[in-house]
Image (cartoon, grey):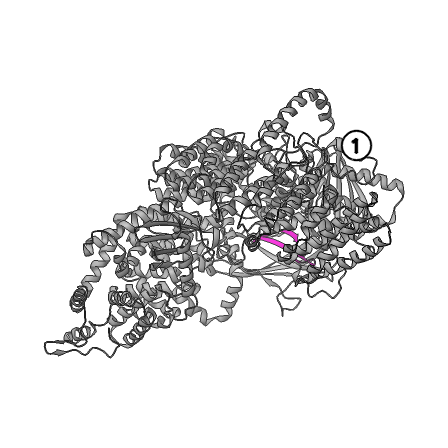
Amino acid sequence: MALKIVKGSIDRMFDKNLQDLVRGIRNHKEDEAKYISTCIDEIKQELKQDNIAVKANAVCKLTYLQMLGYDISWAAFNIVEVMSSSKFTYKRIGYLAASQCFHEGTDVIMLTTNQIRKDLSSPNQYDTGVALTGLSCFVTPDLARDLANDIMTLMSHTKPYIRKKAVLIMYKVFLKYPESLRPAFPRLKEKLEDPDPGVQSAAVNVICELARRNPKNYLSLAPLFFKLMTSSTNNWVLIKIIKLFGALTPLEPRLGKKLIEPLTNLIHSTSAMSLLYECVNTVIAVLISLSSGMPNHSASIQLCVQKLRILIEDSDQNLKYLGLLAMSKILKTHPKSVQSHKDLILQCLDDKDESIRLRALDLLYGMVSKKNLMEIVKKLMLHVDKAEGTTYRDELLTKIIDICSQSNYQYITNFEWYISILVELTRLEGTRHGHLIASQMLDVAIRVKAIRGFAVAQMAMLLDSGHLLTGNMQRNGICEVLYAAAWICGEFSEHLDDPMQTLEAMLRPKVASLPGHIQAVYVQNAAKLFATVLQKHEGATDSQAAQDTSQLLIERLPLFVQSANLEVQERASCILQLVKYIQKLQQKDVEVAEEVSALFAGELNPVAPKAQKKVPVPEGLDLDAWINEPPSESESEDEKPKAVFAKEEPKQSRARHIEVDEKELARRREARKQEQANNPFYIKSSPSSQKVYQDAPGVEHIPVVQIDLSVPLKVPGMPMSEQYLKLEEERRQKERADKKKKDKKKKKREKRGKGKRDDSGPESEEDITPAHQVDIVTEEMPENALPSDDDDKDPNDPHKALDIDLDNLLLGNDYRPLADSEKLPVRTHRREVLKSPEEDGDQDGITQEAKRRSSKEKKEKDRKKSKEEEKKKKKKKHKHVVEEEPPEPLSEEPVQSEESAEVAAPPTSTSAEASDLDFWLSSAPVPPPIKEALAPKTSVAAAPDSEPDVPKDAEPDEEKSLKNKKKKQKKEKDEKKKKKRHHHHHHHGDGGGGDSVQNGTVEEEEEEEPLPPMSNYCLLAENSYIKMVYDIQGNLQDGSQVVVSVIFENKSNSFLKSMEFNVLDSLNSKLQRPEGASPHDGLVVPFQLPPGVSNEARFVFSVQSIVMPQKLKGTLTFIVKSEDSSTHEKLDFKLHFTCTSYLITTPCYSDAYAKLLESGDLKSSSLKLEGLNMPFHHLLARICFHHHFSVVERIDSCASMYSRSIQGHHVCLLVKTANQTVSIDAKCDEPSLLANVLDEIKQTFSQC
Amino acid sequence: MIKAILIFNNHGKPRLIRFYQYFAEDLQQQIIRETFHLVSKRDDNVCNFLEGGSLIGGSDYKLIYRHYATLYFVFCVDSSESELGILDLIQVNIIQTHVFVETLDKCFENVCELDLIFHMDKVHYILQEVVMGGMVLETNMNEIVGQVELQNRMEKSEGGLSAAPARAVSAVKNMNLPEIPRNINIGDINIKVPSLSPF
């Protein structure tokens, strides 16, 4: 036998092994492909042998060929065979080949499950290791599901070698099988404190990867990581943790404050550059997240910038690169600290390394000011000259243009200089960015009126010089510039000194070699020039010159008529005929100039990109009416919110057409002025310029350019931008002198005109006034356009599925928070399932749901526990608590309110961990940012970053923070969306400086009391076994649905199961039952309740009319199972659908709001509340929270609010308060809905 | 996460490729070509980072590379990896481990391209101890070397009797015999070279 084996292997010993194959390939350089194909044939033969050694050898060779790009998937089965060899040597080869070529589409993978499982449990650690390594590369969802449990077991293997691999591979398993995350997480967390540094590092690695995608779920681990950070010495681990903190700090500013100190220490102490760099990076992230709130961390910024400077000055190019990279992050928030290192960055522009130069360029973008723009651009122009013919030069070119044109040419003080720069740039050969230069020329010439004369002269020169026309120029994009030049010369031909010469230049035969679209512009503008020339000669009675011009055109145009380009041809033949006709008239001595120029009369004014929205919709056109029947209801998810606004349009336009009398016009003009004054998007013209145009009605909003004659308007020859540096300096000096004189006057003026421009440059910038003003048409958003919803997550992102709340898992092992459906499948599992397919289907259907439930279940359990402890305290604090509790408008037993509110608080993390986090954070050296963080009014008792109570007394505070936390998490999603919008809005608003606050955000400038926690949950029914509280929310997606969230709490000591929720439908409101169920069937509550646990279920109701409140009777049946017996029980309840519950918090911009009110379609009603003793912002918050309104605008003690019903009714409130009396004026397009909502509001406040 | 590890020579010939995300073979080759194109035109004294090529994920990914004599070691990583950390990893672990292991194994004096060419599988095994599934598994070089060594020893012991002749033959082959005979008679065991195409 043994001999046979030996013989067998001797048989094979002249088979090629890997080395032979490699050698062979190297020896067959000239016919490699052929050689390899013969090798593959050999391999195929070898794979047919029974000898596993031969197979393994063949597979090994295949792995090599795979690297060379050969598809080896045909050998997948043989690879599996080799993988299943009992010998480590072959197994390793098999797994290597599998990891190189297997993927989710490989069908033999499903054959490997058992083999891999066997290997995982092999007594030989290297078998296990090799299986784990291989699996990490080709794990599929099926493998992940089937093997998750085995791998989890390995996480506690005795050998650290296996442990670390098992921990690491869990990340891959999570990605493929997200359901495994929750069950595996506690163990993963445990591994953070594994005695073996390798395992610890692996766990940190995995959690960092997880947290990077869904950071908020891992906030509660911050204390643990903090501990690790201060104790670990492994730089690799430290780097990971520090990077993780960088991702967490934006979510929790308090964390940042806590981090600054240890990070600073690390920065000072570490010698590892990689660690230093990451520390600096995270400190920057912290500073960015704090930049809004904290007074100053200038020391930290200084430290960072200093360290970065050291990096940048280092001779190591890598450090230099990274230093610049980090610098650009600081630049965004602290431009000034970076600006002081301008010298260094300019130096980097000279670096031989292109990556570094590009980074430095990025930095320059943020560093320019009015003062240094010219200087910097001059430097860049020098580089442009040096960087002949490289992509880097193109990069430079775009950067120059970016830098100059940023924020509406904010930093350009002299546009002649800019035009000269652009003209100089046209001399670049071989650039791809001709169109960019062209569009800049057009933009400047159109928008800066004062520059037109100069621009036209320059453009005429460009047309004339013809260097752009020369042969090879056309292949690259620079000839695009001629497009702009021709258009500018034609359009503004009145500025031309010698239009005849330009016309001549534009009709040169060479022009015909330009691209079609440029020729077309040439032809068209030649006609414009022709008109100008005619007009010039008209007065001079010199008919010969005019006729010569016509003759010239008639001679030259036929060239274009023959053009292959349709556009050119068409225009040319049109114009040719026109000119011929004119020539005839001229010969009869008819005056034609007037008429010809009438062809091109009228000025083109710049128009904002979205100006279309401003055009009123013509009467009788209903944009909302369907032309065809709508396809289906379901697809309107995104469109719904927009529809509100679209509806307003026609109303508005109709209103405009009705009243036209002079008075009304004047009134409206006034109103528009007012609006513009308040509109932050509208850049106001300077007060002086307004005077000039005051007599012309309707145009006063067109900003007018002041011409500064200190700059010569005509520069002979090609422009030299450099001369402007000097000129500019002189001009500034002169200005400074002037300014001194005018100082007194200015002070007065400043009082009147508030329209200061927003400059972020250094203070001295203010002194530099631009020589020309830009006729700015801001990228104005039409008032109705909402910033698009920010769903920046890719729906296909595998990490999305991993967004799972883990907080409640972190209690340790005493609790098994996982529902049955959530446990990882064990081998037996599937067989069991097969026996009861029905149950299986059921389970699958509710897996997701159940998971969430069970998480809550768990939380409730914890909560219960803590509640019991609290109860004692509660008695003492009773009064305090009552104060805290929100009124329960719908509760039939107001006495219950505090209790129910407790229960009702959405059951998110009440866990000790979470409170630990708060405690840990609040004990940070710096007190939490209370005031500035107290954010939106709506239900934001605790926005994610706010902590309304300063810790004075640890215990009650903790309790409060718990409640806040609960609430916060529930609202978080809503809130986030909203917030983003607000941010967006305010960002735009920066320039305008309007101080009214819009859209549901009331930013507390003054110190106001923190809001008490509130809850909308109210008691549904209760008996000795169970208690139900509920809340009703409109369904955003579907206008005919509301969602009722019911929290079931088990009050007994028995197990509650088989709960069935049933409601007696009314005509108007129906419980949505699964398809096929009869209208009398109850819905099964998808969970069971162990003693003392509560959980939440949601039920969807469809409603027809929403204008009246309704009540529905219902019953809950359930089985109470105690140790010895089980009984059926039932509990009747009444669901109260208030009108409020049909309202959905919808943000609304103030201008849209104003229009809505003006439209006159709304019926009004009002309400007075007397003797109300609460701060105004509390009042607003209550209305927002309990009645789903958002604040549109608030001015002192007056606020406008908005909400929308699920069926699209607008509800507007104007809330005013004075001397404890609150008056609410309300408008709505549905009077009965309004009346009911007002009643409900009244009720809310009567309970206070 | 590390998305891919590529080692190729100054001419762009791949010496080791390890993708942690599936790409079809032809796409892999394109990525190698693209990466080579990006990396090879850079001077030696410039920084070791650049934005990823379009095929492998665009600018979200960074290429971090080192160039040693005839070889480029390129890691394609996303933002969760520390740039300098990866550079150290290449330098300290991949190269030195290789040197070390090979030194033990073959008494190579210096790692050179030939080692990688002929022992691609071994390099893979080393790499597997450093990076797993796109995440860094171990950074301690002694640990890595120890594990690799143990596994190699295990392989040798498994080889035992049956592998001995193969090893002998391969040693002979390694002597660069100019011509390898088609039929060999070794004593009384008549070995038929299988009906394969000639060497």
* Quadrant of res A988: top right
Residue A1005 in the image, given as x and y percentages of width and height: 64, 32
- How crowded is the residue under tag 1: few (<14 C-alpha within 10 Å), some, or many (20+)? few
Can residue A226 be seen in this snapshot?
no
Residue A828 in the image, given as x and y percentages of width and height: 39, 67
Q: Report the quarter where the C terminus of chain A lies.
A: top right
Q: Main secondary structure of the magenta part?
A: strand
> In the displayed image of the protein, which residue is found farthest to the left?
B187
Residue placed most toward the observer, A79 or B62: B62
The chain carrying label 1 is A
Residue A546 in the image, given as x and y percentages of width and height: 79, 49
Q: What residue type is labelled 1?
A: Lys
The verdict on residue A277 being magenta is no
Q: Report the quarter where the N terminus of chain A lies.
A: bottom left
* Quadrant of res B192: bottom left
Query: Which residue lies under the disc numbered 1?
Result: A691
Magenta range is A1024-1047
> In the displayed image of the protein, which residue is found farthest to the right?
A661
Q: In this view, does A6 lie to the left or right of A456?
A: left
Q: Which element is circle 1 on? A: helix
Residue A104 in the image, given as x and y percentages of width and height: 43, 65
Residue at (62% x, 48% y) in the render:
A438
Residue placed most toward the observer, A637 or B75: B75
- Rendered position, A847 above or below A44: above
Residue at (57% x, 29% y) in the render:
A762
- Rendered position, A1197 above or below A384: above
